[in-house]
Image (spheres, grey):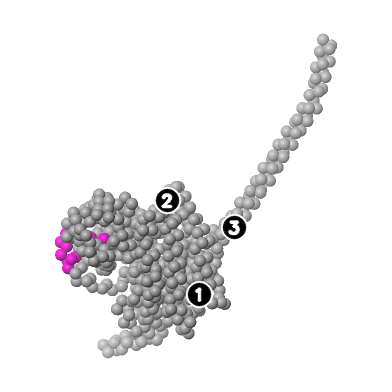
Amino acid sequence: MKLIFGILILKSILAISYGHKILGLFPTVAKSHHIVGTALMEKLAERGHEITMVSPFKADSKLSTLKNFRDVVIEETYNQSRPMIESIFEMVTTKNIFEIFHGFSDIGIKISNLTMQEPMIQKLLKSNEKFDLIICEMTMNEVLLGFGHRFNAPIIAVSTFGPSLWTTDLVGTPSPLSYVPHPFLKLSDKMNLIERIMNILAATYERIYYDNFYYPRQVNLYNEHFPNPKPSLQSLRENVSLVLVNSHFSLTAPRPLVPNMIEVGGFHLNRTENPIPNNIKTFLDTAKHGAILFTLGSEIKTTELPPEKLSAILNVFRSLKQKVLFKWENWNLPNKPDNVLISNWFPQKEILSHSNLKLLITQGGLLSIMEAINAGVPFIGIPLYGDQYMNMKFAEKSGIGISLSYDMLDEKELRTAVAYILEDQDYEHNIKELKSRYEDQPIKPIDNAIYWIEYVIKHKGAIHMRSAGQHLNYIQYHNIDALGILFGIAFIIFYLIWALIMKCLCSGRSKRQKFQETNQPNHKIKYSKKKKNN
C-alpha cells in the first residue's frame, strides 16, 4: 500500500516537474465562453502544467486555489465593453443579417483593442516571461496572434462553437457551400437550389467584408500594439498549429476537417459539477410535476423583452402545473406567477442534470444545446443571432427540439410548443438516443483536447500536420485564378473557331454572290437575243 502511495506521489511530482508554461487568452466578454476556457485550463493545470489565464472573469474558487494557476483578470475590458454586449438584444431583434454581422465585427474590434490596452496585458508583453504554448480563443480577435511571435511559442486556437470563417481560414479547412451552411442562416446541410444560392451570396458577402473591411482593422491593431521588427499578421495566421472546435459530428451536420482542426465538442461537460444552491435545489425537489428552465443565455437579458412578449411568456408559465426557473436580471418581476423562481444567473448544467427538469427553453446557443443533450432534456429554441438558427434547424431535423421565431412569438405559439415537448415522448427518446451516439467516443472530448495540446508542445508546433491550404489566399485556395485562365483560354479558342467559321461562311457567301453577278448578265443577253429572233 505504501509502495503504491509512493508511486502516486512520485508521478504527481514528475508531472509538475515536466509541466510546460502555457498562456491562455480568453478575452470574450461572455460568461459561457469563460466556462469553456476554464474547463480546458483547469484540466491542463491538473496535468501539472503551469497555467496563466487571461479573461474578463475571475476564476472560480476551485481553480484559483491551484498553485500552478495564475489568474489575470482584465476588468477594464469587461467594464467598457458591457454596454456593447448589453445592446446585442436590441441589435439582433431590429437589424438585418448584414447589419448584425457588422455589429459583431465592431464588438470584436472593440474588445480586441481594450484587451491590448489593459495594463496587465502590457505588463505581460514587456516582461521576460517565457511560454511553451499560447492557447487563444479565436472569436474576432486576430490581433492576439501576435502573442505567438512575442513569446516565440506555437499557437493553438480554440473556438467555443463550431467551425467558422475565423477558424477555418487558419488551417485551410474546406467549407463546400453546397452542403456546409453559413452559420448565420436558417439552413441545414440539405439545401435546395434557392438555399444554395442564398448560402453562396452570404458566404461571398462575408468574405468580401472580412477581407476588405474587418481584417484590415485587426492588422492596424496588430501594428499598433506589437513593435517592429515583426512578421505580418497574415504570416502568423498561416502558422497556427492547431484549432480545437467545440463541435462534434453527432451534434451537428458532418463536414470535412483538415487533420489539425480537432472536434472536441462538449469538453466542458466533463468538469465536476458544483452543488446546486439550496433555494434552487428545494424548488426543483418539490416540483412533483416537473420543472422548466427558461434562459436566453449569458449575453441576452430577459429584462429587455418587450412588454407584450414578456406578458405572453408569463401567461404561459401561469397556466402550467410545472414549476419554472426564469432567468431574470432584476430582483423583482411584476405579476410573477406563483410557480416561477427568478434569478439573474442559474447553474444551467447542474440544473439540467436534476431528475425533475423536463424542458429547457433557450436561445439555441451551441453550449446550451450540448448541455441539454448531455442531460437528455428536450428543448425549445428561440434563435436570435449567429449559429443559433443553424443549431435549431439541426435540432428540429433530429426531433430533439422545437424552434420558435422570436418575431412571431406569442402566447399561443409558446403554449403549443411547450405542450408538444411535455406530452410527446418522442422528443425525450430522440435526445437520449442522440446522447448515446455522442457519448460513443473512443476518448472523452476533454482528454482528446489535452492529448493534442501536449502533442503540439511535444512536436514543437507540429508543422507536419499543417495543410498547404493554410498558406493559400482565397483565390488560390479555390483555384479561381487557374479556372480564370482555363476559362479564358477556352473562350479564346472558341472565339477563334467561331471567327474562322464566320470567315469561311462570309467567304462562301461572297463567292456565291460573285458567281451570281458574273452569270446573271449572260442570261439577260441570251434572253434578249432570243426575244429579237422571235
Please report contact status of discs 2 and 1: CB closer than 8 Å, yes or no. no
Q: Is disc 2 surrounded by few (<14), some (14 to 19) or many (20+) residues within 10 Å?
A: some
Q: Please identify, in this view, whether the residue under mark 1 or under mark 3 is nearer the observer.
A: 1
**Residue at (51%, 72%) from the top-left corner?**
222
Q: Earlier in the sequence, mark 1 or mark 3?
A: 1
Q: CA distance from mark 2 to mark 1?
A: 44 Å
- Residue, disc 1: 225
Q: Position of residue 405 (x, y in %)?
A: 33, 52
- Of residues 259 and 228, the one nearer the viewer is 228
- Circle number at residue 481: 3
The range drawn in magenta is 282-294
Q: Nearer the viewer, residue 142 or 505?
A: 142
Proximity of marks 3 and 2: CB atoms separated by less than 8 Å: no
Residue closest to the far top = 534
Answer few, some or many: residues within 10 Å of disc 1's Cα (few below 14, many 20 plus, some between 14 and 19): some
| Residue that badge 2 annotates | 191
Q: Earlier in the sequence, mark 2 or mark 1?
A: 2
Q: Nearer the viewer, residue 426 or 271?
A: 271
Of helix, strand and loop, which one carries label 2? Answer: loop
342 on left or right of 238 = left
Q: Amino acid at mark 1?
A: His
Indicate the position of residue 237 as horizontal and vertical percent values: 51, 69
Q: Residue 358, located in which quarter of the rendered image? A: bottom left
Q: Quick one: SS at disc 3? A: helix
